[in-house]
Image (cartoon, rainbow, N blue to C red):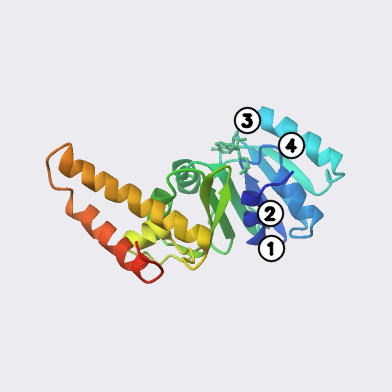
Amino acid sequence: MINQRLLACAAYLHGTFLCDVGTDHALLPVYAVQNRLAEKALACDIREGPLRAAEQNITKAGLSDYIHMILSDGLQNVPPVGITDIVIAGMGGETIMHILETAPFSLEKINLIFQPMTKAELLRKWLYEHGFEIRNETCIPDKKFLYAVMQVQFTGNIIIPDGKDIYFGKMNLYDENALAYAKNEFVRLSRIRMQSYLREGKNPPLELNAVIDSMADALKEYDKI
Ligand SMILES: C[S@@+](CC[C@H](N)C(=O)[O-])C[C@H]1O[C@@H](n2cnc3c(N)ncnc32)[C@H](O)[C@@H]1O
């Protein structure tokens, strides 16, 4: 069964040819083709085990003519022709950054959807600094955790992000989940700052103060911290 995280990724699809990187059981490509969110798809994974599970699900759904599997580290073995949407979901932010850094073809004009399980802030910072724009972002609860799902486009415009850009991205903080996510991030960083005063007896780096101030300013507009 497809979960809320993957449904949120699917909601950002708007092309005809999906490439799902780290597909595991191919739940997303099967859902996307069945629901006409894509006409066809590539289900890619770095390991053979997940691709065997993917094959079973694709065959069971009768979609072998529409979803092809590729054994690939990131996009290395993926032929770029015709791909309109790329989803990279369910892995760490640093792995997603690595896959983008080593992409063997231009990602311009492709609708990109990322769902990091960890280190979303590092991924956002990297995206801003490498000419990718986060166009939309939602926050999805899954098994007691809150996860970011982002829709991204390569524009070539480099932005120096501030704290709220890095930690909140494009989330709509009027949304209850997004506000909870933003507050968690604010509290987490504030604790790190406090620890550097209390345990290490030293002033936190100026950048950390600037990041926390930017987050506090953004949060003030939505809620009392
Ligand atoms: C936790 S599963 C996520 C499955 C699905 N995308 C989701 O979000 O539910 C992560 C999958 O990514 C694959 N993976 C990890 N690193 C990868 C890489 N560099 N390239 C392709 N697949 C990768 C793993 O083998 C695994 O099947």
Q: Could you classify mark 2 by the number of other residues whose Cα lies within 10 Å: few (under 14), some (14-19), or many (20 or more)?
A: many
Q: Which residue is mark 3?
A: 47
Circle 2: element type: strand
Lower sequence index among marks 3 and 2? 2
> Left or right: 26 with respect to 142?
right
Badges 1 and 2: C-beta atoms under 8 Å apart? yes
Quick one: SS at disc 3? loop
User: Residue 211 at what x, y percent from top left?
Assistant: 28, 58
Residue depicted at x 79% and y 60%: 36
Residue depicted at x 32% and y 61%: 215
> Callout 4 environment at 10 Å: few (<14), some (14 to 19), or many (20+)?
many
Mark 2: which amino acid? Leu
Tell whether circle 2 marks a residue whose Cβ is less than 8 angstroms from ligand 1: no
Classify residue 182 by image quadrant. Answer: bottom left
Residue 45 vertical placement versus 149 (above, below): above
Q: Is mark 3 within 8 Å of ligand 1?
A: yes
Give the labeled residue for mark 4.
Answer: 54
**Mark 1: which amino acid?**
Gly
Q: Earlier in the sequence, mark 2 or mark 4?
A: 2
- Earlier in the chain: of badge 1 and badge 3, it is 1
